[in-house]
Image: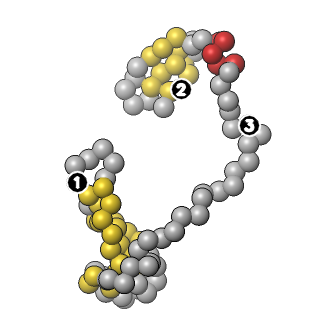
Amino acid sequence: MMHTEGKTWMCRSCENTESRDSQAEVAMTTQDGQRDDGAPAVADTTQGSAETTEEPCPAEDCDSDRAYSEMMPKPGGSYEVRLFTCVECGHKWRES
């Protein structure tokens, strides 16, 4: 993501720089005046799954040893991340 430093735009990750263009910046939009409706509602696919796996819940106040599991591809990587949701308390964690 680019940020400004004086009269230049600078990328935080690769440190690429570009000169600022005041005419182009006038056309840019900001979040001023926009409302925040919060995060969108997303269905939890792990709860509908009938299959569980034997995996101890890491939550301190839960002694369950069953969890729903789901495999998700890791963005930009060649491997997957395994997501767990505790059957008892609903605690979520991941294992990569």
Question: N-terminal of the two: label 3 or label 2?
Answer: 2
- Specify few, some or many for label 2: CA neighbours under 10 Å numbering under 14, 14-19, or 20 or more: few
Q: Out of 80 and 11, give the one closest to the viewer.
A: 80
Residue that carries the numbered disc 3 in the rendered image:
32
Q: Residues within 10 Å of mark 1 (few under 14, many from 20)?
A: few
Q: Quadrant of residue 39?
A: bottom right
Callout 3 secondary element: loop
**In which quadrant of the rendered view does residue 48 lie?**
bottom left
CA gap between label 3 and label 2 equals 17 Å
Q: Amino acid at mark 2?
A: His
Q: Is 3 on the left-hand or right-hand side of 33? A: left
- Left or right: residue 84 versus residue 10 is left
Q: CA distance from mark 1 to mark 2?
A: 32 Å
Q: Is residue 56 left or right of residue 25?
A: left
Mark seen at residue 79: 1
- List x then y, in percent, for residue 91: 44, 76
Amino acid found under the numbered disc labelled 3: Asp
